Amino acid sequence: MTDTPEESLDPANWADMHKTASRMIDDAVAHVEGVRERPVWQQMPQSVRDGFLTPVPMEPTPLDAVYDEVLSTVFPYAMGNIHPRFWGWYMGSSNFTGALADFLAAIEGSNLGGGDTAAAQVDRQVVNWLKELMDFPASASGTLTSGGSMANMVCLTVARNKMAGVDVREEGITALPKPLRFYTSDQVHSASQKALEALGLGRRALRVIPSDANFRMSIPALEQAIQEDRAAGCVPACVIATAGTTNTGAIDDMQAIAALCKREGIWFHVDGCIGALIKIAPVNRTMVDGIEDADSLALDPHKWLHTPFEAGCALVKDAQLHFDTFELHGEYLEEKPRGIASGGFLADYCFELSRGFKALKIWMSLKEHGVEKFGRLIDQNIAQAAYLTDLIHTDSHLELMAPTSINIVCFRYRNAAGSDEDLKALNTEIMLRLQESGLAVPSDTTVGGRHCLRVAINNHRTKRQDLDLLVREVVKLGQELELPAP
């Protein structure tokens, strides 16, 4: 036997750990409570950046010193999406209870791949709640994922296997009797293309359908593409509708697409990562009518449920097909009628065996606030986007670049003397100065071939006064930057 003392990672003094942990909680409360008083984002100094290039630590450092480093080098240079004037890309703004739940989930420590545990029951309950909110049947299945990209990947894998005409798990995609075709609008998120590439189907499997003047998938063009592919010997496998496009927030006509898919025998998938949860909004819920008819649905609680990153969800109507797509057990993962390995494996519905307890932050937040409040907050963001749109319409310096469908507003500062190229440079500079000043974070995009600023109001802390400030500052910066007309 060895005389070497045995070690663990538990603190030598739990009282000291309690003091440090209490300090962290106090600082966390102050950080969120005072968020409006700080810059949305700030550039990281080179000295701080260099600190992340140091070698791996071989010797211990007191936890208080490690935490001090976090306070000085990490928190000041965050993305800023919890700030009320963060409107870039499409981020949720988190909530404090969800953050506490993340801590508790880490302390509880369960791996959610499987096991007869309370954590697994919470996970199943959250999936059942999301099915209920989306008007999916109780017999449907679902799985929590890291986000929308993985949720879409799960759903499209099930669709591929259903429509393949061969046992893909046994024989692989090289055994496909005919090429599969998936259809989506030219406004689709890149996650769909990535998924089809990863599934071995390639970019050619994705047939991009033009969108109409409101950036919704053209139904006549979709019907024509399906007919052309059938005539060419391909199998129309799946239509990917979008409930809230990333560029403009447009919502495809899901009722029309559902009817078409049913008539043509095609899988109907909805990428609802942005807009699916409008289903719970009392004023605007009819915007997503037809979403309940989807064969599969991807959605993101870390957006309009404001769950701390990350949390996505894939829902599938055909639970048996979903299970058959992913179920696989080695000798080391046999289910048992009793004990910890009883009760089914959550990993049978996704790619991941190691899975964190992300359900707890959704579960606690929904219990604390109730679904109705989250629905009102969605309506609030949509109303704020309409308010910003009105501000743009009433200011001659600004130009709306796309119809405002939900909570995404695309606009630009305009200079009548400037070309589109000049206006892109001008508006890009406006955006960068807004970000660098810490006043606000919009992002940018291109719609209809023209560059614009993009404001995605997915934020429960945003107030109309923040949007007033944004418009004033955009106009001010535009006037300072634009060249005088020749």
Image: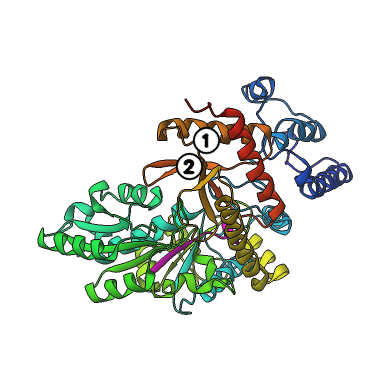
Task: Please state which of residues 72 and 260 is positioned toward the viewer in this rendering.
Answer: 260
Task: Please state which of residues 363 and 117 is positioned toward the viewer in this rendering.
Answer: 363
**Secondary structure at numbered mark 1:** helix
| Quadrant (top left, top right, bottom left, bottom right) of the N terminus | top right
- Specify whether residue 166 is in view: no
Which residue type carries mark 2?
Answer: Cys
**Which mark sits nearer the N-terminus, 1 or 2?**
1
For disc 1, the marked residue is: 427
Residue 398 image offset from top left, x and y in percent = 54, 44
Q: Image check: 184 left or right of 380? A: left
- Specify whether residue 58 is in view: yes
Task: Please state which of residues 481 and 62 is positioned toward the viewer in this rendering.
Answer: 481
Residue 263 image offset from top left, x and y in percent = 24, 76
For disc 2, the marked residue is: 452
Which residue type carries mark 1?
Answer: Asn
**Contact, CB < 8 Å: mark 1 with mark 2?**
yes
Please determine whether, in this image, residue 32 is positioned above or below residue 43: below
Residue 134 image offset from top left, x and y in percent = 50, 73
Q: Image check: 62 left or right of 177? A: right
Spatial CA span between label 1 and label 2? 7 Å
Q: Image check: 236 left or right of 157? A: left
Region in magenta: 295-304
Q: Quadrant of residue 432?
A: top right
Asked whether 79 falls inside the magenta stretch, the response is no
Q: Which mark is residue 460?
A: none
Task: Please state which of residues 217 and 59 is positioned toward the viewer in this rendering.
Answer: 217
Characterize the local packing of mark 2: few (<14), some (14-19) or many (20 or more) Cα atoms within 10 angstroms. many
**Secondary structure at numbered mark 2:** strand
